[in-house]
Image (tube, rainbow, N blue to C red):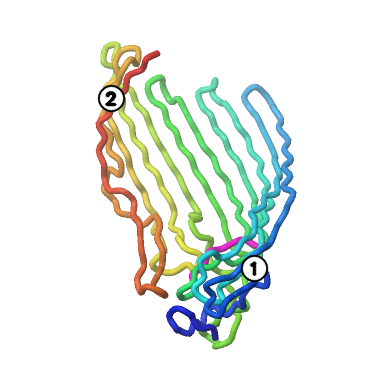
Amino acid sequence: MPVDPFTGITDETNVTPPSRRCSNITDAGTRYTCENSWNDVSPRIGLNYKFSDAVFGYVAASRGFRSGGFDGRPTTIEAINDFKPEHLKSYEMGLKTLLADNRIRLNTAVFYNQYEDKQVLLTFGTTVVTQNAAKAKIYGLETDLEAAVTEKFTLRGSFGYTHAAYEKWFDPNALNPATGTLGVDYSSRKLRNTPEFTANLAGVYDIPLGEAAIRLLGNVSYVDDMFLDSENSDVMHAASRTLVDAGVFYVSPNDTWEVGLQAKNLFDKTELISGYDARGFFGYAVGYFNQPRRYFLTLKYNTR
């Protein structure tokens, strides 16, 4: 098993040999040279069609490329490693529509993404490395709506569904704790920062006050639960969250100026939004949370 040259600790979770793309590795692994190159052609093709003045459709297919590279901060000689380029095949189809005499705008799109050699950031003991998962797919739909319900009341909303899964991800160099042998199948893991459902609903309502108006604003957003790291560690599992913002404004005649009070995160919810599981190295995990309830007093003047 490899031994960390700085701590002297045996690392049983990372037995990948040093990259053949790297040379001049000293005994302590403090000096080395890595060199490689990658190239790719990333085409895109699309077709748009205007069914009418109110309905516009499109389809598109493209290929994406993310360059390979080298892990820049290894803590073992064995972690001096490179990773392959990531490739993406992406397909999308959508409609953009205007309905009810242009009082409703509704846009909808469906998509399918296929990844090859997807780059995944992982923590192995004291080492952070980038590894290529063989295959992953992401598909789903997105829709957004804007509706002038009345002359004084406007609604805006969006909804998203995403299915994300690794189709094949096998690490032959990882130690399987169940069998004591090398080789672990990670295909059942969830992709990081990929909630299954997201939604948002906002409303604006104007209450006439002579030639001026009192404007009420409200916004509700929802994000499904998700993992914040590729290892799917328990401490990096973010629960689903619903946040509410609200505001009230005085709008002068002709919208010349306005003054208002807004509250963000009205119910003062505390939600985990990012972090890092460093228990394997430092013995603790770091979590970052959303901002608490905040109030804003705003004054706006329109020069037009």
Dominant SS in magenta: strand
**Which dot marks residue 118?**
none
Taking the image as shown, residue 216 lies to the left or right of residue 173, namely: left
- Mark 1 or mark 2, whichever is nearer to me: 2
- Residue ID at (49%, 43%): 159
The answer to which of 50 and 31 lies nearer the viewer is 31
Q: Is residue 99 left or right of residue 262?
A: right
Q: Is the C-beta separation of discs 1 and 2 under 8 Å? A: no
Is disc 2 placed on a helix, strand or loop?
Answer: strand
Q: Residue at x 57, y 58 (%)?
A: 164
Q: Quadrant of the N terminus?
A: bottom right
Residue 60 drawn at (x, y percent): 70, 41
Position of residue 142 in the picture relative to residue 289 (left or right): right
Q: Which residue is more in the foreground, 101 or 162?
A: 162
User: Which quarter of the figure has residue 303?
Assistant: top left
Residue at 60%, 80% (x, y): give it. Answer: 183
The C terminus lies in quadrant: top left
Residue 97 in the figure: left or right of residue 223: right
| Label 1: few (<14), some (14–19) or many (≥20) C-alpha neighbours in 10 Å | some
Q: Secondary structure at mark 1?
A: strand
Residue named by callout 1? 168
For the residues marked 1 and 2, what is the alpha-carbon distance in whole angstroms?
Answer: 54 Å
**Quarter-of-image position of residue 234:** bottom left
- Rendered image quadrant of residue 235: bottom left
Q: Which residue position is annotated with label 2?
A: 299
Q: Is residue 184 magenta?
A: no
Q: Earlier in the sequence, mark 1 or mark 2?
A: 1
Say what amino acid the circle numbered 1 marks.
Lys
What's drawn in magenta, residue-wise? 117-123
Q: How many marks?
A: 2
What type is the residue that disc 2 sits on? Leu
